[in-house]
Image: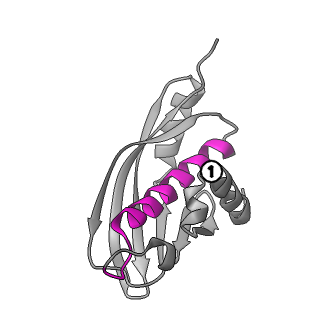
Amino acid sequence: MEPHDLEAYLHEHIPISRHMGIAVVQADLARVTLRAPLEPNINHRSTVFAGSCASVAMLAAWSLVLLRVRDAGLDARIVIQHGAMDYLTPIDGAFSATCDSPDEAVWARFMRALERGRPVRVDLTAEVESEAGPVAKMTGSYAAIPPSKG
């Protein structure tokens, strides 16, 4: 899936991503980077609303799982099971969230479980940056749930 295809998918299926101004900068099996502007994500202190920051970070990681599942030719419902954010500094401009892929052994185990029709989980980290450098970090567990048979 090309970056523009992922962006169109997100905007259609997760409409808030369009309202937040999320753009896909990079989308491949190794890394997903999403970018968002300050304006639609601003809070009362003229910085990025923490919920917007968390949403972009969580969506970057979710998108990586989506790309991996689709690349394997599998179908699954992808959900975040647990997520935690660490905020390092206020964000006063556009920001991006990047989720790098864990090693291939993690994905091999993940895909074997999905192929067998079992739910599976993967732990991912998304780093959030602005022009000032690192500003936040999200860690999350994502579950992929195969379609029910019947």
- Residue placed most toward the observer, 109 or 26: 26
Q: Is residue 132 visible?
A: yes
Name which residue lies at 42% across and 75% down. 42
In the displayed structure, would residue 124 be above or below residue 19?
Answer: above
Q: Quadrant of residue 47?
A: bottom left
Q: Residue at point 50% right, 73% down?
A: 40
- Is 60 in front, or is 51? 51
The image quarter in which residue 6 lies: bottom right
Q: Which residue is mark 1?
A: 67
Q: Position of residue 45 (x, y in %)?
A: 31, 80
**Res. 30 in view:** no
Judged by its main secondary structure, the magenta piece is helix
- The quarter holding residue 125 reads bottom left
Question: Range of the magenta residues?
Answer: 45-70
Binning the other alpha carbons within 10 Å of mark 1 as few (below 14), some (14 to 19) or many (20 upward) gives: many
Q: Quadrant of the N terminus?
A: bottom right
Q: Quadrant for the C terminus, please.
A: top right
Residue 42 relative to residue 24: left or right = left
Image location (x, y in percent) of residue 49: 37, 70
Q: Is residue 17 above or below residue 119?
A: below
Q: Where's residue 67, x and y in %?
A: 62, 50
Residue at figure coordinates x 48%, y 28% from the top left: 119
